[in-house]
Structures are given as structure tokens and as C-alpha cells.
Image (cartoon, rainbow, N blue to C red):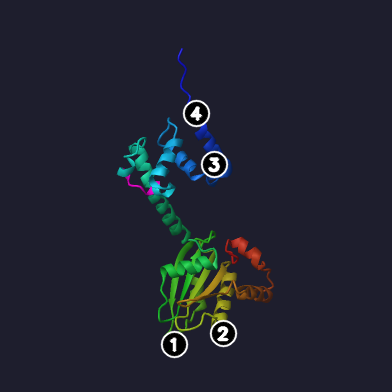
Amino acid sequence: MKYPYKHVHGGHRQRLKDKVRQNGLTSLSLHEVLELILTYTIPQKDTNQLAHELIDTYGGFSKVLEADYYDLMKNKGVGEETALFLSMLPRLFDIFKEDKEENDINFLRSPYECVKYFRSKYEIKNKEFLYVVCLNNSCKIMKTIIIEGNSDNSVSIDIKKFANMINNENTASIVLFHTHPNGEVKPSREDILTTQNILNICCIMNVVLCDHIILNEKDYFSFGRDNLLFDMYNKFSKNFSLSISNKQDMCQHIGFKFDE
């Protein structure tokens, strides 16, 4: 009677998968990671020895993934599917990273993300500009309104027109960007007054002003991080006898955080 052959590594691939489920991929050594990868294109055979051989041949795990498709095909035990799969992985990681960065930049959840978004999309021009970024209740960017400054390097705002600009049922919060192309990022008295007026309008319209960020070419100032914004919220609440949450509760409510 013939008995089915059972190789020495029988059940080993299942133990690798269980280990990843319980402790994550980083619990595996690099040759075990490669071994597990190979199981998805080599379903029946033991992949432990092949993983060791490939790492020895190319000089490391990353070198195996960087190897050319046709070069991989020269290795015994590596078929077309395996060679194609391994050679695709680095580009797959690149696509994942690019897509993640593209999606992440559509959300503004901290001053750092705000500044990163602004510098990736806009330039500091030789005149002051105000950028009003409208966000939904998940801090996703809905639209951006750009208000050009005057010839004297200042930005004047008609509060009624501003209210109409952000009067959209999807606008739950806004972030202000204000450029100081030829000056310090520290807010002027006019900047503070304008921010207070905008915040008052936002509170009346039930729209959250997440932050007002002033930028020049090298630096930036965050009203929220410096607590100026929340002093304004407190002032508004006293004037109108309303209860405004403290900084931490408010940040959690809108998903916008100042502690990174």
C-alpha cells in the first residue's frame, strides 16, 4: 500500500500565517516573510528552501524584490507567476504609498497637515492672500475660496460676503490660510481682529473655525496651537452667554488635533 508523501515542512505555511495573525508580519524573519509570499504563487510545494536560496543568490530580501522578472526566471523553482508576482511587489508598494498620500492630503486634521497641504498646492506670492478651506464633518476638503489682498499687502473681508461663501450644507468647519510674503508670521493686530470677526460669524452659523495659519516662505504661525483661537472662542461664549468646549474636547469633537 502506498501512503501519500508528507514533507518535513508539512503545516509550516499554516503556522506562518497563524503567527502573522497573532503577532503581525514583523514577528517573522525576512526569509520567513519571503517564504510566506511565495506560498501564494506556489501552492503545493515547500517554499522554505527556495526563500533561503533566493536571498542567498541576490544578497537580501529587498534585492530579491528588486530583481528583474527575466532574471528571477533563471532560478530553479521560480515559474512565470512567481517571477511576475515578486517583480510587481515594489511597484505595488509605491502605488499604495502614492495613493495614501493623495488621499491623506484631502483631509486636514492638524496644523502640520494644513501646512503640508498648503505648501504642496500653493505658492507664497508677492501679495497677501487669504485661503478659506471648507471641510465636511470628517475634515475632508470640500472647496477652497481664495481672496486676493490689496496693493498695500493687506486682506480686507466683507463679513456678509464671507458668510455667503461658506454657507453650504456640507461645510462643517473651515481652516484659514493667510500669507505674509514679506513679513513675520506673527499675527498683526488686524489679523487678530479679522480672525475674531470670522470666528463670530462661524459660531453663529454653527461652523467650526479649526485654525488660522499664517505662512511665509520658511515659517508658519497657528492660532490654534498658540491658544489664540481658543481665547477667542471663550470671549465669544462670554459675550453671548454660550458654553464653548475646552480645547481638548473641541478638537476631539471635530477630529482636528493640535498635539502631534
Q: CA distance from mark 2 to mark 1?
A: 16 Å
The picture places residue 186, in percent across and down from the top left corner, at 54, 81
200 horizontally vs 115: left or right: right
Q: Nearer the viewer, mark 1 or mark 3?
A: 3
Q: Name the residue beneath numbered marker 1.
A: 152
Q: Name the residue beneath numbered marker 4.
A: 8
Q: Secondary structure at mark 1?
A: loop
Q: As displayed, is residue 161 above or below residue 2?
A: below
Q: As displayed, is residue 2 above or below residue 128?
A: above
Q: Which mark is residue 98?
A: none
Q: How many marks?
A: 4
Q: Residue at x 47, y 78 (%)?
A: 216
Nearer the observer, 89 or 152: 89
Whether residue 145 is visible here, answered yes or no, is: yes
Q: As displayed, is residue 254 above or below residue 194?
A: above
Residue contact between numbered discs 2 and 3, judged by CB atoms under 8 Å: no
Whether residue 39 is visible here, answered yes or no, is: no
Q: Which mark is residue 189?
A: 2
Q: Name the residue beneath numbered marker 3.
A: 20
State the extent of the magenta-drawn residues as a range.
64-69
